[in-house]
Image (cartoon, helix red, strand yellow):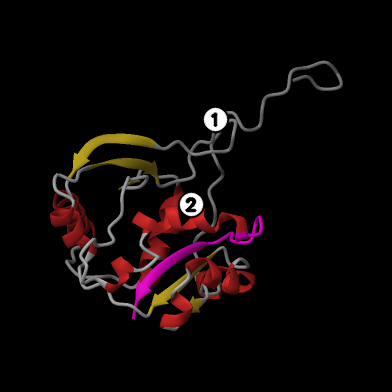
Amino acid sequence: MMTRSGGPVKDAFVKHKVEKFDMSNFDWIDKIPECPVFCPTKEEFEDPLIYLQQIAPTASKFGICKIISPLNASVPAGVVLMKEKAGFRFTTRVQPLRLAEWDTNDKITFFMSGRNYTFREFEKMANKLFSRRYSSAGGLPAKYLEEEFWHEIANGKTESVEYACDIDGSAFSSSPGDQLGKSKWNLKVFSSFLSSKQSYIPSGTIRFLVQIMQS
């Protein structure tokens, strides 16, 4: 790339340090609105796509929402991963927890850790690191953790986070007695349910992340 005078111009997005932000005051965190929370009835919960389209006008403004399931999961996700999925293991990813260097596409590099875990092994590792860093075995206030996150992001330290994503399968139970597992919200069957309904979904209707929780 050249300037009008003919001299070369350095690409502004090629491996440069991001300026540090002033994070001395985190009061702005309290001003971030909470995402909407929806509590459908059992009848409304019956058809995921119809319900998602109903809440889309509100949820899409936030990009994320929580849905409190009226059905109970009698089998915890951890039990599913340890017992119902025999031999289940996964490889984690590592993400730099900082605004340190950007590439030409404005993306921070993610890479595989190469470490393979069972659910219990990952839980033990995470609990050990948490206890060592925060000298606590219990939970910490959400605001404190959020401030810690932004502090690391802004100050360009070499901290990173190891996490699991892009894992095949689901932690929904296959037990016939698990109400939530038998529902159409079960990710093991949701794709086939979605395919059968595809012709009824207007393009671009659903554009938000859903977190399903229990009451």
Describe residue 180's horizontal placement relative to residue 198 as left or right: left
Q: Residue furthest right?
A: 4
Inspect this view and state whether residue 128 appears: no
- Taking depth in this image into account, of 94 and 133 the one nearest to the observer is 94
Describe residue 44's horizontal placement relative to residue 179 as left or right: right
* Magenta region, residue range: 200-215
Describe residue 80's horizontal placement relative to residue 148 as left or right: left
To which residue does mark 1 refer?
A: 15
Q: Where is residue 25 drawn, in percent x and y?
A: 50, 67
- Seen in the picture, residue 104 relative to 134 is either above or below; the reply is above
Q: Secondary structure at mark 1?
A: loop
Whether the magenta-drawn stretch holds residue 198 is answered as no
Q: Where, quadrant-wise, is the C terminus in this rendering?
A: bottom left
Give the residue type at disc 1: Lys
- Seen in the picture, residue 148 relative to 90 is either above or below; the reply is below
The residue sitting at 53% across, 38% down in the picture is: 107
- Taking depth in this image into account, of 46 and 34 the one nearest to the observer is 46
To which residue does mark 2 refer?
A: 154
Quadrant in which residue 32 is drawn: bottom right
Q: Where, quadrant-wise, is the N terminus in this rendering?
A: top right
Inspect this view and state whether residue 209 appears: yes
Describe residue 132's horizontal placement relative to residue 105 as left or right: left
Q: Which mark is residue 164?
A: none
Q: Secondary structure at mark 2?
A: helix
Q: Where is residue 204 drawn, in percent x and y?
A: 65, 56
- Taking depth in this image into account, of 116 and 4 the one nearest to the observer is 116
Whether the magenta-drawn stretch holds residue 206 is answered as yes
